[in-house]
Amino acid sequence: MKPVFVFLTLALTLTTANRKISIGFNPGCAGLSGCNGPNPASKLLYIKSEGDCDSIHYVWTFNQKSIPTLLILESSNNASVVSIDWQSFLHIFNSSIHGSIRLKCGKQFCEDSVLSSSVYVLKSIIQYNDTKNNADITDKGNLYVSSYDLSNLNWNISVSQEVNSFLVEGSPYNQTGTFSKDGKLIMKFTTKDKSGRGPLFPHLPYNDQSSMWEIILTNLTTAFVGSRFALDFLVVNPENVSFSGQKTSLSKTVKKITKWSIDDEYSPSVFTSQQILWVNISSERPSSYWLWRTVCYTNVTPSRAFSSDVQTTNLVLINKTTVTGLESNHLLLAIFGKSVIDKLPFKRFSISFGKPDDGFYRATEYLSWTSLVGVGEPPADSLSLMVVCIIFAGVGCPVLVILFGAVYLVVRRCRKHRMQRVALLSNYEPIG
Ligand SMILES: *[C@@H]1O[C@H](CO)[C@@H](O)[C@H](O)[C@H]1NC(C)=O
Ligand SMILES: *[C@@H]1O[C@H](CO)[C@@H](O)[C@H](O)[C@H]1NC(C)=O
Ligand SMILES: *[C@@H]1O[C@H](CO)[C@@H](O)[C@H](O)[C@H]1NC(C)=O
Ligand SMILES: *[C@@H]1O[C@H](CO)[C@@H](O)[C@H](O)[C@H]1NC(C)=O
Ligand SMILES: *[C@@H]1O[C@H](CO)[C@@H](O)[C@H](O)[C@H]1NC(C)=O
Ligand SMILES: *[C@@H]1O[C@H](CO)[C@@H](O)[C@H](O)[C@H]1NC(C)=O
Ligand SMILES: *[C@@H]1O[C@H](CO)[C@@H](O)[C@H](O)[C@H]1NC(C)=O
Ligand SMILES: *[C@@H]1O[C@H](CO)[C@@H](O)[C@H](O)[C@H]1NC(C)=O
Ligand SMILES: *[C@@H]1O[C@H](CO)[C@@H](O)[C@H](O)[C@H]1NC(C)=O
């Protein structure tokens, strides 16, 4: 009975239709001045991934003079859609912008169907001079730190519906600071409709509730001999605040964890991954995640020879008076409203790239880093068959040798005993 059941579930999972994914650029905004022309003020991407019994919504904004921001929502209703009231959304200084992005199921608002929500803000690029050549951005000896705010970039977006992906290239309006004529921050975001493994190093495993997020820093201008770069992110710890800004009794928190693996077959000599998890405080179950292997690549074609290190600083609650740009962010204003943004517990961390003695950023002028965002439990990096074989060879063989050895010794001892007994007996001559 049981094998049949297992076979049936297997057959069922194999034949289940993939999720339906659609990508829209400024969807429903035709005709309004802020959305038209070759370089509109509003650059909003909406990706919906519809499954059997849930839907995942990704909303990215790359608006002019605004920091790139991503909202991820999972709803238990697979027919839900993110609806945008464009008239209000485009007017950032009008308080009616709050509530201009909402979740709808048919004609009704349905934020009560939200299972998880998370917000990511791509704040700035940090440049520092690695005086001690230790690739440690937290080292107080590494002076000369400068930060380039990403609201100064102009984003050129291209969408590929065929591969459920979009590519965005950020370059400055005016060539200044970190950015030269050819300097670019490039992002590629691909939403997955089934499970698998990334085609390129570090071959991250993904599932149908996740999206691959790749960032490339190319041709940046180095201000120092030992310049290295880092990306500065903010995440919202949405404790007790639901999407749409009302207080709820949810109790969630954001934390960072590091995971070790003994398996490096898919990303040679990289044994750690890091995860930002949105967890339910009482059950510790993640509802949303962002993860990466601690590796980046310094060549257009990632390979082991061109791999470098990734360091992540701790997640710390920020003091909002020291961070600019949040109150003028279209997406945050639309979801939470100005008064709630001021109370939201944002946490900050940075990802820095490079390793000691690699010649610094100027040696290659190229960095690519791949991560995965999604909802539910992060996809587990299961042990590959090869590693299982190696473990068997490493642990199994000695055990077998010891076992066979023991059996052999026992058998030999028994035979010796018997022979001794036979020999003993043969010394006696039968009487008679
Ligand atoms: C969404 O749910 C409906 C009804 O349950 C189902 O018919 C439909 O196939 C689902 N959509 C997808 C993409 O699975
Ligand atoms: C704000 O938006 C509302 C509704 O869109 C509109 O009626 C009102 O005139 C706007 N106020 C200002 C100051 O623009
Ligand atoms: C920057 O770092 C490099 C390499 O470690 C060092 O040679 C140089 O003196 C530093 N420059 C400044 C201005 O500190
Ligand atoms: C955007 O990119 C496309 C193709 O990569 C290019 O043809 C176009 O000129 C770019 N637009 C701007 C405003 O940079
Ligand atoms: C870019 O340069 C132009 C003039 O060349 C200037 O008008 C504009 O304000 C500058 N933009 C920024 C963001 O500095
Ligand atoms: C970097 O700039 C050079 C020219 O200065 C260009 O040939 C090269 O393609 C650029 N690299 C990337 C990845 O765009
Ligand atoms: C969130 O709600 C829980 C219980 O509902 C409460 O214990 C906790 O103090 C609240 N946290 C904040 C930041 O309001
Ligand atoms: C958090 O976990 C508790 C205990 O498992 C559960 O009762 C509660 O519904 C969970 N809350 C959310 C938002 O998932
Ligand atoms: C936040 O920063 C401001 C200005 O630096 C300071 O006055 C204030 O005390 C800080 N607040 C907290 C909670 O640290």
Image (cartoon, rainbow, N blue to C red):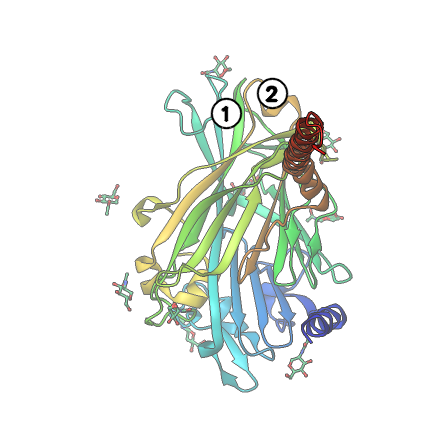
At x 42%, y 63%, the residue is 333
Of residue 330 and residue 54, the one placed in the foreground of this image is 54
Tell me how far mark 2 sits from mark 1, CA to CA.
9 Å
Secondary element type, mark 1: loop
Q: Amino acid at mark 2?
A: Asp
Q: Earlier in the sequence, mark 2 or mark 1?
A: 1
Residue extending farthest to the front is 432
Label 1 within 8 A of ligand 3 by Cβ: no
Ligand 1 quarter of the rendering: bottom right
At x 42%, y 71%, the residue is 244
Of residue 336 and residue 194, the one placed in the foreground of this image is 194
Q: Is residue 51 visible?
A: yes
Q: Which residue is mark 2?
A: 358
Numbered badge on residue 135: 1
Q: Is residue 26 visible?
A: no
Of residue 54 and residue 7, the one placed in the foreground of this image is 7
Label 2 within 8 A of ligand 3 by Cβ: no
244 left or right, relative to 416: left
